[in-house]
Image (cartoon, grey):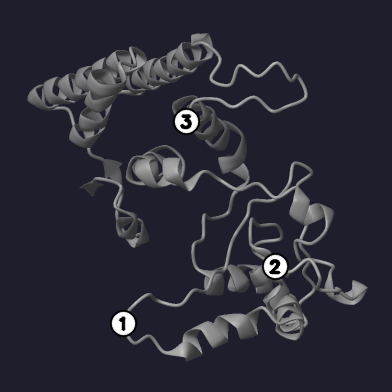
Amino acid sequence: MVHDHFRPYAALDAVDHAFCNAHHRRELQALIDIDKEVWALDMRAVRLDAAKAVRQAKEAGESALGPQPVQGFVDRSWQAVRAGLSFHRALPAFDPSPNSKKRQKQRPGHNLLIRFKTFKDEINSNVLAYEPSPGKMTELFQSGQAVLAVWGTGRVQSFANTGFPVDFAYPKEGAVTLLTTACPIIKPNASPLASSFVKRLLEPKIQLVMLKDYGYGPVLKSVVVPPELGKMAPIGERAAKLYTADWSIINDKREEWTKRWNREVER
């Protein structure tokens, strides 16, 4: 089945999957025309040459390319990826801060190339599944198929509350911020109960209930957290080290990055 990385297609496990070369070329063309990234020219050439080789093989009565030409196209693809990484590393510093202890920022495109390469080379071989369903994630743990996963404190706390022996570990660099928000809707004749509900959520007693049952870190610094309730939640030093992503960049690139993730990582 040839498709464009639309995620629901991945659920079709009774077919072989192939990704559409035309979609690849359109994305590469955008990088060439808009972002002026020269490495994309080489990657586009690989795609065009591969399509030509397949066409010629069909005309010759063959059902597939041989291992040698296939490996050649794979090698050329990785050469293009390495060229892309070199391209970004050669650019002027994105964050020319003189502070050597500060983590230097890099361009989104550079970070993305590094992440995709790391996932494909070092992480994928150890991943059972990229599972988006909390219910399915719970099943994987309960059945013993999974012993380690990237999950939020809220999900882990709720799971632990059922009696399952599970705990949450914070990366030494800090965990990624996940926020639960509530706000009244601005509209004529809005019910005052909406604001009252939000104020109720901020009461220390309710903050502790959400901490105990859902693993949510209190948003009020005045809340005193009993030691037995603060084992998983992002409080104190753990809260201070939380990493908050720049969603203005993520939202602008979400569709492009999702397609690339589906193509290069979650296959």
- The disc at residue 108 is 3
Q: Residue at x 70, y 57 (%)?
A: 148
Residue 217, visible in the rendered structure: yes
Please give the residue where the numbered disc 1 appears in the rendered image: 188
Q: Picture coordinates of residue 56 (x, y %)?
A: 13, 20
Tell which circle, 3 or 2, labels the residue nearer the N-terminal end.
3
Near-viewer residue (21 or 248): 248
Quick one: label 1 or label 3, which is nearer the N terminus?
3
The quarter in which the C terminus is drawn is: top left
Figure check: 74 above or below 258: above
Q: Is residue 43 above or below residue 201?
A: above
Amino acid bearing label 1? Pro
Q: Judge whether 251 appears above or below 194 on screen.
A: above
Identified at 16% across, 20% down, the residue is 52
Residue 49 in the figure: left or right of residue 267:
left
Query: Which residue is under mark 2?
Result: 219
